[in-house]
Amino acid sequence: MSATAGGQEGTATQTGGHRLGFKPGMVIQELGWDEDVDDDLRVQIENAVDGDLVDGEYGNVVDAVILWWRDDDGDLTDALMDALTDLVGGGVIWLLCPKVGRPSSVDPADIAEAAQVAGLATTSTAGVSKDWAATRLVAPKTAH
């Protein structure tokens, strides 16, 4: 009976890594890690890409960036610009902030303003864990 329940649960629920659109073989850079991050979500992302997260010292292009960010971490625009450094063209930045009402939550208007100044567009948000919300940021497509 538990095998059936487990199987149903596996098909009915997507992990945080899959909800963020990560697939096996993708290289995901993690910035802003601290002891308060959601380790379960980190494991889900690593499972989705079938590999480890890389840090800011990786030195090669990455398919996506997850940026853990809290209200008191400094200048969000600068952090977003830094997150673009290794990001492949067409890549995505997932900005992970404490949910509204949690300590160190970030005002959505501040996220929108910082993204715009950094040349990014906010495309969607996703509930990825109990305490963290994810905002998907992409560089707008430009005509060449």
Image: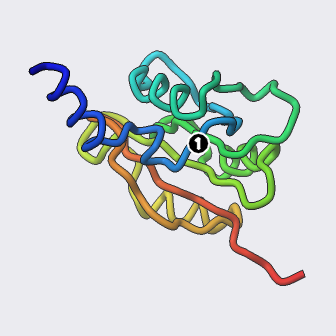
Residue in the foreground of this view, choosing between 103 and 61: 61
Q: Which residue is mark 1?
A: 23
* Horizontal and vertical percent position of residue 28: 66, 36
Residue 66 sits in which quadrant?
top right
Q: Residue at x 64, y 62 (%)?
A: 138
Horizontally, residue 104 falls left or right of residue 94, namely: left
- Image position of 58 with respect to 128: above or below: above
Q: Residue at x 52, y 35 (%)?
A: 68
Horizontally, residue 81 falls left or right of residue 106, namely: right
- The extreme left residue here reads 1
Residue in the foreground of this view, choosing between 110 and 90: 90
Residue 54 sits in which quadrant?
top right
Horizontally, residue 10 falls left or right of residue 41, namely: left
Where is the C terminus found, in terms of image quarters? bottom right
- The extreme bottom residue here reads 143
Check disc 1: other Cα within 10 Å, few if <14, some if 14-19, many if 20+.
Answer: some
Q: How many marks?
A: 1
Residue in the foreground of this view, choosing between 75 and 96: 96
* Horizontal and vertical percent position of residue 21: 52, 50
Q: Amino acid at mark 1?
A: Lys
- The extreme top residue here reads 35
- Image position of 132 with respect to 77: above or below: above
* Horizontal and vertical percent position of residue 67: 58, 39
